[in-house]
Image: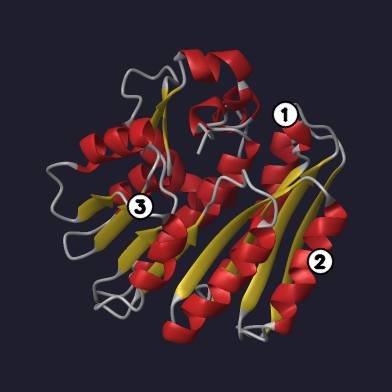
Amino acid sequence: MNYRHAYHAGNFADVVKHAVLARVLTHLRDKPAAFRVIDTHAGAGVYDLSGIEAGKTLEWRDGIDRLIGADLDQPARALLAPYLDAVAALNPAGALTAYPGSPALTQALLRPQDRLIACELEPQAAAALSNRLRGDARAKAVAIDGWTALTAYVPPKERRGLVLVDPPFEQPGELSRLTQALAAAHRKWPTGCYLLWYPIKDTTEVASFVRKLSRLAIAKTLRIELILATSTEDKGLRGTGLIAVNPPWRLYEELESLLPALGNILSRGAACRTTLSWLTGEITT
């Protein structure tokens, strides 16, 4: 595997993904019972925005840096607080030099009774992840293939929690693999919450992926997308998407306002497109 997320850490796709992740984790904390997070493609944990990789692309400037500098209204600021507080905790001096990947963001939102399994195989990222989580009894780094982990660790003993699937998409056919993996995991743990990230490069390919997901007929499946009209991303990344299965019931309502707000900030007010729709099983509030 050659993918290195350090080049892309904190970009617009990370902002949307991690803002949604933080909302899901916040809702899981609403009940006192313990939950477990299984992060199948965890990465390094924390990324150095002043490092060589991030410095080559500077994608974070059009992502997290733009969000931090935005004039947010009070409702949006409240919804983003768990996410932005985790970012701020890594940057106590104020200057934005470090960015939390999904394991570090999850770690920041775990309670003493909650658990994290973070899976990573790429040697350099796996070593950094292990160092990040070492000494935290709530969290464990595991050198295992993420696709294997997806079915190996479900259902968790807590019977509550989230599976985050955020693969690097280096190989052809990974959208199909994502569909198949979700189907297999859902058969083992149908009540679990799943959050699947996917890049939007070819909208025709994404439309096919969404149709295949719909045919699975998994109840309570929410599609979340932001497509920017103009993008500085390499390899034609036009937008970012998430599939949320069994999301917290308030998530849809929150994203009705938050997703357009993020789109306006990340596109600098230019035209962008957001999608928030139920593939199956709309939850009524």
Dot 2 or dot 3, earlier in sequence: 3
At label 3, which amino acid type do we have?
Answer: Cys
Dot 1 or dot 2, earlier in sequence: 2
The residue to which callout 2 is attached is: 208
Q: Estimate the x, y position of residue 180 in percent, counting from the top left.
A: 60, 72
What residue is drawn where x is 30% and y is 49%? 143
Q: Compared to 62, does 12 lie above or below?
A: below
The residue to which callout 3 is attached is: 119
> Residues at badges 2 and 3 in contact (C-beta under 8 Å)?
no
What residue is drawn where x is 74% and y is 45%? 239
In this rendered view, identify the residue nearer to me: 88 or 140: 140
Separation of disc 1 and disc 2 at Cα? 23 Å
Q: State left or right for residue 179 relative to residue 162.
A: right
Separation of disc 2 and disc 3 at Cα? 28 Å
| Residue 267 quadrant | top right
Separation of disc 3 and disc 1 at Cα? 26 Å
> Residues at badges 1 and 2 in contact (C-beta under 8 Å)?
no
The reply to whether residue 233 is visible in this rendering is no
The residue to which callout 1 is attached is: 234
